Amino acid sequence: MANYMGSDCRICRRENVKLFLKGDRCYSDKCAFDRRSYPPGEHGERRGRKISDYGIQLREKQKIKRIYGLSEKQFHLFFERADRQKGITGANLLIALERRLDNVVYRLGFSNSRTQARQLVQHSHFLVNGKKVNIPSMLVRVGDVVEVRERSRKIQLIQDSLDAVVRRGVPQWLDLEKDNLKGVIKSLPVREDLTMPMQEQLVVELYSK
């Protein structure tokens, strides 16, 4: 996440849901959320105060922002674009976030987390339609081909991530050619493809105030 230097596990505990920010560790018995599923801090276990409607909306925005690892400014820009599009604003927002190149790299299994995916993209380890790309926020389109560059194919992190992709699965809107270290965007994602617990309408309500 932009400018965040703390523990990813604290984020999951703060949002009271496992966000899978640390890749394989989130599936293991080392997961801090599974061991301490209450808010971080000295009084985390004893917190039980009622949260206002605004607080609920704010926490939902923070959760979605943290899932995709965006800064406040980046997230707000995505919302503004979604609001200008035809259709349901909340669904437009999530679909746009799913189409980010760093998310696609993660979804295809070339990295264990979106944070890793962002770093790999920034270091030019991927091609899109045969051209080098180093912009994590680039939005993919139907028919785009995302593949690991030839010089990057022996990176152990990418190999290990692909070995573990079976556990996470690849969304139906993507087609992974594992042996060729390549993925194709078969279609744009739809709201039903997103399985994380997100209530995007709360974000719309928050920004509508």
Image (cartoon, grey):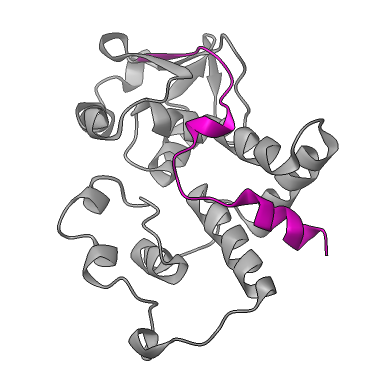
Q: Relative to 168, does residue 131 appear above or below in the rendering?
A: above
Q: Position of residue 195 (x, y in %)?
A: 44, 40
Q: Relative to 176, does residue 17 appear above or below in the rendering?
A: below
Could you say which is closer to the camera, residue 194 or residue 117?
A: 194
Residue 95 image-quadrant placement: top right
Q: Does the magenta portion include 186?
A: yes
Q: Relative to 168, does residue 47 appear above or below in the rendering?
A: below
Residue 168 visible in this rendered orientation of the protein: yes
Left or right: 50 in relation to 53: left
Left or right: 6 in relation to 165: right
Q: Does the magenta portion include 147?
A: no
Q: Residue at x 38, y 61 (%)?
A: 8
Q: Which quadrant is home to the C terminus?
A: bottom right
Q: Relative to 26, does residue 86 appear above or below in the rendering?
A: above
Could you say which is closer to the camera, residue 38 or residue 155?
A: 38
Q: Position of residue 118 (x, y in %)?
A: 47, 40
Residue 73 visible in this rendered orientation of the protein: no
Could you say which is closer to the camera, residue 177 or residue 209?
A: 209
Q: Residue at x 37, y 66 (%)?
A: 7
Residue at the left extreme? 29
Q: Residue at x 75, y 41 (%)?
A: 89
Provide the residue span drawn in magenta: 182-209
Q: Position of residue 43 (x, y in %)?
A: 38, 91
Number of marks in the rendered image: 0
Q: Position of residue 59 (x, y in %)?
A: 58, 66
